[in-house]
Amino acid sequence: MKDTIDRHAERVRPEFPLLKREFDGRPVVFLDNASTTPKPRSVIDAVVNVLERSTANVHRGVHSLGEEATRLFDEARREVASLIGATPNEIVLVRGTTEAINFVANGLELGPEDEVVFPASEHHANWIPWRVHGKPVPMPIDEDGVPRWETLASLITKKTKLVSIGHVSNVTGAIAPVEEVVRIAHEHGVPVLLDAAQSLSHLPLDVNKLGVDFLAASSHKAFGPSGVGLLWSKKDFLAKCPLYQVGGGMISLNNDIDVGGFIPRDAPFKFEAGTPAIEATIGFGAAVKWMRAIGMDAIREHDIAMSKYLFEGLSDIKGVRVLAKKLPVEKRIALATFVVDAPAMTQESVARALCDMFGVCVSAGFHCTHVLHARTHLPGTVRASPHLFNTTAEIDLLLEGVREIAG
């Protein structure tokens, strides 16, 4: 187990400049990948190259720089599409997962009585849109925040217009049974939206095999820059979906705006008004290339071994409650959320102490899942979320810190 983790980690660690940082002489131990991931050198270089050598707008200029920037931008879209088994014209580039989910919420044109079923454990990005659009129907969760998937069929009614689920929980790391959810929803004629924010960089994804109708994800949790993400949808939805925003770049050339209105371009371009996040998108493409070069199977192999090592270590510490620790490793990613029973310390102060005393960077609080924490009666939690570059020595340092704080 240790050999598997460290073999993969040592292979890629030199590619991450952030890992060379130190705090008060202590190297950074970055265990907050569920919030955002560090960027490998190839991604940084791709962004810098655009800024230094290829600065131009895309799909507009006929000069050499414009053509070069457009080529790099279009290549990035193709890379992103290939990662999930899609075609480029099925990918709408957005700011991130949150915007992608809101795009669908707007596009479905839900009425106040139209129901959306989703687990109560979902991130706010997959909770609040259904408060604004339609009628939310939260699925029950167990005492650890894991959805009770067996209740799904009973929650679907004639009013249900969408089932929306996170592929991987950002709190428990639990992997949703996507194919089963799709089967049940489709039997009732209901489409399925998959929030892949946490899974895009951890699990092999193929929208055709998964069978979902929508997929939303972000670049910055998958080794790419922030400010760009993707919405994948089947072409029939994109063809009939109302315009989300309008402006330059999304109308066809044969328009007389002054007299006859305008004709939008075909999808995805009709949904991408204005100048896009060019550098971030090209960086996103570079991140996908990097992950594909490593291999998603290799990433998953490290992930499974790391999950076992992390959960076994935390479970052995007295005074620490680990959520969903009984889930088998094949049904989770390496993400552990826990509560430290430390006198006079909040979970936020536990995380601060881990950073100040050991250089370990983790998340603490509610992780944008207030409902999950309320229903499991937790006043906040600490979350450690390693990734491919993390070693067993770094996990040992986390465990040492938690053990010392827990007393």
Image (cartoon, grey):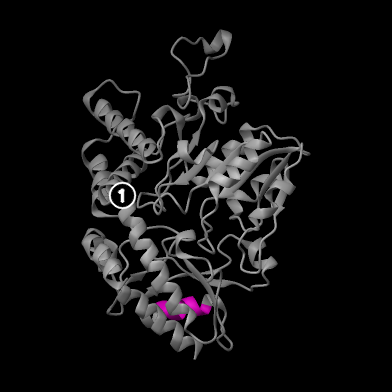
Q: Which quarter shows the N terminus?
A: bottom left
| Horizontal relation, residue 338 to residue 134: left or right | left
In terms of secondary structure, where does tag 1 sit? helix
Q: Which region shows up in magenta?
A: 349-355
- At x 46%, y 39%, the residue is 209
Residue 196 pos. (x, y %): 49, 48
Q: Work out which residue is located at the far bottom of the displayed protein and give it.
A: 407
| Prevailing secondary structure of the magenta residues | helix
Q: Residue at x 24, y 29 (%)?
A: 68
Q: Amino acid at mark 1?
A: Met
Foreground pick, 379 / 164? 164
Tell me where residue 31 sits by quadrant.
Answer: bottom left
Dot 1 surroundings within 10 Å: few (below 14), some, or many (20 or more)? Answer: some
Magenta span includes 240: no
Asked whether residue 353 is drawn in magenta, I would say: yes
* Residue 43: image location, x then y, percent: 28, 49
Q: Give coordinates of residue 303: x percent, y percent.
A: 38, 62
How far across and down, in percent of the image, does residue 232 sit? 48, 36
Which residue in the protein does label 1 denote?
A: 291
